[in-house]
Amino acid sequence: MSLLTRVISHPTAWLILIIPLVIVSPLGAQITVTDLQSPYSFVNDPLDKGYFISSVNGEAETADNNGFITKLDPNGKLLDLKFIQGGKGDVTLHAPKGMAVVEHVLYVSDLDTLRGFDTTTGKPVLALTIRSPASSQSGLPQTSLSDVTFDGKGHLYCSDQKANTIYRVDLATQTFSVLVTDRALAGPSGLVVHPKSGQIIAVSWDKGKISEVSPEGLVTELFSNGFFSSRFQNLRGVDFDRWGNMYVSDFTTGKVWRMSWDKRFQVIAEFLPSPGDLSIDRANNLILVPYELAHAAEMNGLETPSDGKPKKEKRTLADYGFIPPPPKPAAEGPGGK
């Protein structure tokens, strides 16, 4: 596909021509990265302020050791297309999918292994193979991790879409346990920890619903996708902005939805080519979206909600990402997705 067409919640709409370089608009509100290979996830680094994009580069379930991770600088400029590359040096990386940044380590879900890489050097620092005892006994397929998220309290959570399972990883001991296995998760694809409540939010690939999972493993359906409320098809990514609005990407319908705290739904972008595991850069109010089938990724400014500003304060171009945002608020909840 040679064109990316998006309609975002803003008075204008953009038509971006895909060419093999990084495009930065004059106002810095939109950045497009191309020359990727089946990009899956796009995250920011809260400490070093840069960005990372994972590329599967081949079959999503094949251990071919040719996946790679792209690194951008704090302004979205391409630093290294293959900053971390499977098969190069001592790096093993097959089909990198979801990612999370904790301190100076980039954690990557790669088939049945959670891998960690130094965000500065790209050197591997962790390779934790994850296998569910229940899966091995029941003859279920080998673990295939789809996403990873951090709770801000020393734990990572990883989703296994095929096994309807979420694992908890203790970073201090580098051990894992099964948090929950439940068919109600319906193919948990994207994960995020709610920045205020601490609950785990999981979006479903199989049935397009959204679930909440407690740290104890209790699954509660937040948004169903039944006959009378069929909004979603195959959900891939989920994250929150600094005001508590939730964003989800629907890979099949090509839409990005925003759900406000009072459960209002709004399509903020559509006609997207296979939007993947999106994330939100909360500090800079940016949405980061990879496009698997277009082999590209985009960064766009988000509109500040009306209730996100004092009533008498006028809205500015910063509310749409066209100029630098106001001073950052105090840190709240886990960062780096």
Image: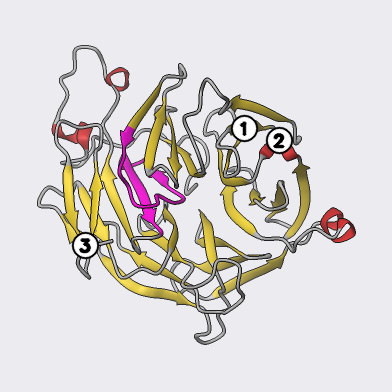
Residue furthest toward the right? Answer: 137
- Residue 283 shown in magenta: yes
- Picture quadrant where residue 191 is located: top right
Residue at x 17% of width, y 24% of height:
315
Q: Disc 2 vs disc 1: Cβ atoms closer than 8 Å?
A: yes
Q: From the image, which quarter does the N terminus lie in? A: bottom left
Please determine whether, in this image, residue 5 is positioned above or below residue 214. Answer: below
Question: In this orientation, which residue lies closer to the viewer: 233 or 323?
Answer: 233
At which x and y percent is residue 48? Answer: 38, 58
Residue 199 in view: no
Q: Secondary structure at mark 3?
A: loop
Specify whether 1 is left or right of 111: left
Q: Earlier in the sequence, mark 2 or mark 3?
A: 3
Give the extent of the magenta segment. Answer: 268-292
Residue 184's disc number? 2
Mark 3: few, some, or many residues within 10 Å (few <14, many ≥20)? Answer: some
Sooner in the amino-acid sequence: mark 2 or mark 1: 2
Q: Nearer the viewer, mark 1 or mark 3?
A: 3
Judged from the image, the secondary structure of the residue bearing numbered disc 1 is strand
Numbered circle sitting on residue 267:
none
Residue labelled with disc 1: 211
Mark 2: few/some/many CA within 10 Å (<14, 14-19, 20+): some
